[in-house]
Amino acid sequence: MKTIISLCIVIGVALFLLRTRDNREWQKFVAVHHCQVIGHVSDSFINSVTVDSKGKVGYGSGYIPEKTGYSCDNGQQYWR
């Protein structure tokens, strides 16, 4: 059990460090390419109901995180 907890902690720390590094790299990219914020989409939850060909009902749900849109001087638009 201690091994599983230790592994979860190591994975959590690694993910945090990767995310931090990714954010730093993005901020550098924004500065170099003079990116401007062009929009923002709030986070949302999605719920759905489906019926298959046999009449069986299915339910689903999902989460879409918030995103900010950027237009950069390289002619591209990015949503993060």
Image: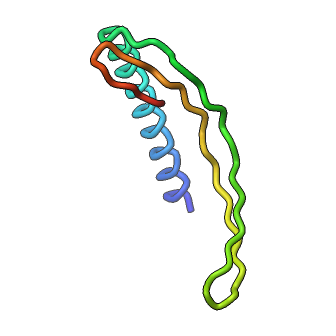
Tell how many labels: 0
64 on left or right of 49: left
77 is higher (above) or lower (below) than 33 = below
Decide which of 28, 18 is in the foreground and name it. 28
38 on left or right of 47: left
Q: Residue at x 27, y 17 (%)?
A: 74
Expressed as whole percent of the image width and height from the top left, the position of residue 49 reads: 72, 69
13 is higher (above) or lower (below) than 31 = below
Residue farthest toward the left in the current orientation of the protein: 74
31 is higher (above) or lower (below) than 51 = above
Q: Residue at x 44, y 26 (%)?
A: 20
Decide which of 55, 59 is in the foreground and name it. 55
Here the colouring is rainbow
Decide which of 11, 3 is in the foreground and name it. 11
Q: Residue at x 64, y 91 (%)?
A: 54
Expressed as whole percent of the image width and height from the top left, the position of residue 11 reads: 46, 46
Residue farthest toward the bottom in the current orientation of the protein: 54
Expressed as whole percent of the image width and height from the top left, the position of residue 32 reads: 30, 9
- The quarter holding residue 26 reads top left
Quadrant in which the N terminus is drawn: bottom right
Expressed as whole percent of the image width and height from the top left, the position of residue 53 reads: 61, 87
Decide which of 31, 72 is in the foreground and name it. 72
